[in-house]
Amino acid sequence: MTLISPAATTPGHELPPRLSGGGRGRALRELARRPLALVAAAYLVIVVIVAIGASWLAPDGPQQEDLARVLSGPSAAHWLGTDRLGRDVLSRLMFGGRITLLGVAEAVVVFAGLGITLGLVAGFTGGWTDRLIARFGDLVLALPGIIVLLMVLSVFPGSELATMVALGLLSCPTLLRVVRGSTLTIRGETYIKAARLSGLTSARVMWRHVLPRLAGPIIVQLSLFAAAAVLVQSALSFLGLSTPETQGPSWGNMVGEASDVISQDPWLLVPTGGVLVLTVMALGLLGDAMRDVTAARHLAPPPPRRRHGRRSPVGPSRRPAASGETPPPATSMLSVRGLTIAFAAGGRDIPVIRDVSFDLAPGEALGIVGESGCGKTITTRALLGLLPDGGRVTGGSAMFDGADLAAMPERDFGRIRGNMIALVAQEPMSGLDPSFPVGSQLTEVIRRHHAMSRGQARARAAELLALVNLPEPREAMSRYPHELSGGMAQRVSIALALAGNPRLLIADEPTTALDVTVQAEILALLRDLGRRLGMAIILVTHDWGVLADLCDRALVMYAGEVVELASVEDLYRSPRHPYTDGLLAANPHLAPVADTLPAIPGTVPPPSAWPAGCHFQPRCRHATDECGTGIIPMAEPAPGRLTRCIHADKVVTAR
Amino acid sequence: MLRQTARWLVSSLVLLFVITAATFVLASLAPGDAAKAILSSQSGSYTTQQYQQMRHALGIDQPLPVQYWHWLDGVLHGSLGADLFSGQPVMQELNARLGPSLSIIVGTVIVSGLVGVSLGTVSALRGGALGRLVDVVSLAGLALPNFWLALVLVELLAVRVQAFPATGYAPLGTDPGPWLRSIALPVLTLAAGGVAFVAKQTRDSLSEVMSRDFIVLLRARGLSRRSVVLRHALRNAAIPVVTVLGLLLVGLLGGTVLIENVFSIPGLGQEAVTAAGSHDLPVIEGVAFYFAVVVVIANLLVDVSYRLLNPRVRES
């Protein structure tokens, strides 16, 4: 369809998750929280009411002439002025809304009817029906819409109904595609399969179970199409092709009339164009807001339920942890003290990392363990100055090479990233730019850190690929990321990290996404590289086996805090924090054979719902009232061991 | 590569066939015909015999499939038939009108692409007030009816300031000045929506790419934000933007019909409206054919861009 403004064909639409009973109510409430969307909706309601009730509401009839007051401009008698026949512009706009909006309604009905039906059938049935409908859609979209509309108009001269039906038909493939795509996704879900197996007819399943979930994307498409239809109806009416002046006023032909007297009275363009612009804008705004609401519902985590900590009202609050005061050991290369990171949300900072402290010696391999969502990754990203949007360091320091990474301005990080501290991430494939071959990505980074010619850089790139044991390094240079296996891609990522000869390598779950055999190879490679290059490693993981393979010491993190710090051996043998104990017990490698795997009850609370006192106490079997009062300080039960638990001795005896 | 070309060729031919056939059927449904129109323009009254003779002379007394077959046969021999009223070869008439239409369409795509991508990029990276500004600009750009915007621009920039001609078209000669001035207002009018459309897509697409893992990793390897955006992010964000530019180009075929009528520019769109009003079937067919060719070329350009931008498409 080539006539409508392309707004209706905007790609990209989010599919909302399955709505529970209150889901749609929530969507409406969210919509209501957007003032602009509310204004738009209110405006549209008023326009529709005024158009329908024009006969009673309009001060004058649409054709009532007053030749004594021609082109009078706005006045008390005629709020929006009069046209060249002395007719009241406001009244004509009210009556004109009837013709214009009726046309839009006709187009929308056809658009929705065809688009939804065909889309549902195509997506739900699949097979050749699907292919046939998809072909039909492609074909209709390719038709020169304006030619078709002109043809339709010469068959039915001036007919609004015919034009608008044709417009709906010509545009329906955009909606068809959206509905089909979403239906395909939903069809695969278990509850739809169950509904079909339980004997409900396809039509019933589509109507009762599939359609309600598509409401969001469909409303988005409908409002955008309605906006386009207003413009098309008005344009054709403006040209006098559809609903010309002889059929009474429409918003489009009123602009046409205004253009005839533009030199005498340009004012007439303002109300006639204004009502069009406002209506289209309102529809567009409503569509955008609806899209945001559906997308937000799709992305946002469930609203946090604030736990009521068992805070005793009279208990004295403990002094905050004093870990910021421990001086760094002389041998330390990286010394983190009291690092605190917060994210801005709803106008205030919510801390996600609190009081993290540790030291790292040159060449040492330090592990960070914990469940997902405990802040392991965020802690390491802060060391590179690469916190996600909205995040910032709100306290503490991270001294590296005489500089404080926690307070470093962005421009100084150029000196750090890549050639002091490098990063290898979890997903090897998504860590590489899909658009460039391996060699070009490597030479770009090499030349960023070393003054080398292109040829020298290519030679160095091949060396690095050989260093990470990539087979046939020269040939691999011309490969694109999608041509590599996961293990190969991770080797390339490591080569990229080594390009600037870093002194510290942060490996963020480097083996989680790989096959078990490849995991072992990559771990051996990291261990070997650390030793050969004298490079320190921070390994983020939730896998105790990986940790034991590579690291000397480890910190255990829970809900944004370090809860235990010790040598890996000590952690295994005698954990001093109930969380470490629980994690170890839940480890399949260590649990006794033929026993059910003991899991820690509950889940990690989101930062907005951290309990008072010890963050772990709601899930802890040793918890007492004391655990919920004030911040728990770090204790040092043995030299070189730290635990953030006041019942550390109970953990030992309970084992 | 060969298979790709063959597939493109076949689908293009199917498209051309279907569009021209559909236009033929639609046009023949219209009440009245060219014979009536010509006779009544020559003299007020005419006999049934004169009418039949005229129909026979024009070849429109034959069954529809035969007429279409003749037309197709003509196309294969490089002819689109003759204008029923002027007797001129349709191809010659339309070629003369191609320049103005293409100037406006290509000009609008270029302006929309350059301004839209820049605006979208800035708003994707800055967010905040600037991001909202782009939101407002896009919304306004999409909401302004282009026929109305054209009138306002003429009133402001042609009548009051007199910087540009209000109507007409100056062919591109040795001095591009008059040509540029003559297409400035039409391009400006159509680009309002185009810029908005491209800016919005660029912003959405670039924001999505900027949130991917490899962007953080590129930064972690020491590349500057600037080079990450210009060399890596924009390239990965380009495919949806190219798609949108293709849609825009096709959509502008409709836009020119309006704009050429408002600015009295002798292009294909103006011809289409005239021909549809007078049942001049060969001309209508010709315009549909030219439009379809533009769609085919736009699809080809988009396809080639995909291939250049995405290594995965390149080899499959």
Image (cartoon, rainbow, N blue to C red):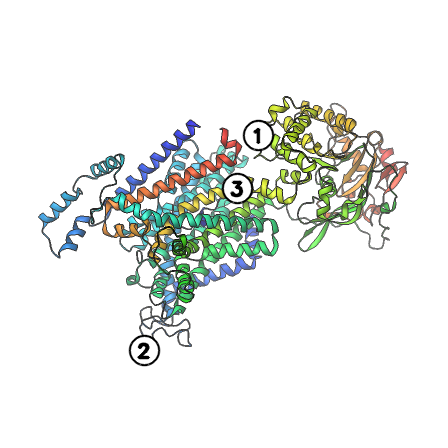
* Quarter of the figure that contains the N terminus of chain A: top left
**Does residue B32 appear to the left or right of B304 in the view shown?**
left
Q: Which residue corresponds to mark 1?
A: A482
Near mark 3 (Cα within 10 A), the count class, few <14, some 14-19 or many ≥20, is many
Residue A513 visible: no
Q: Determine the chain carrying the residue at label 3.
A: B
Labelled disc at residue B238: 3
Mark 1 or 3, which is nearer the eye?
3
Task: Give above or below for A469 relative to B310.
Answer: above
Relative height, residue B177 to residue A546 (above, below): below
Where residue A229 appears, x then y in whole percent?
40, 53
Kind of residue at disc 2:
Ala
Quadrant containing the C terminus of chain A in the rendered view: top right
Of helix, strand and loop, which one carries label 1?
helix
Quarter location, residue A413 = top right
Task: Identify the residue at image location x=33%, y=73%.
Answer: A86
Where in the figure is residue B300, as x and y percent of width and height? 42, 37
- Residue at the image point whose x is 78% and y is 26% from the top: A532
Asked if residue A539 lies left or right of residue B5, the reply is: right
Q: Position of residue A161 (x, y in %)?
A: 32, 53
Q: Quadrant of residue A600?
A: top right
**Chain name for mark 1:** A
Looking at the picture, which amino acid does disc 3 mark? Ala
Image disc number at residue B266: none
Kindly report the distance in space between the C-alpha atoms of the residues bearing marks 1 and 2: 77 Å
Label 1 is placed on what type of residue? Answer: His
Q: Of tags 2 and 3, which is closer to the observer?
A: 3
Residue A68, labelled with which disc?
A: 2
Instruction: Give the structural element (helix, strand or loop) at label 3.
Output: helix
Instruction: Depth check: give the residue in front, A608 or B233.
Output: B233
Which of the 4 quarters of the picture holds residue A552? top right
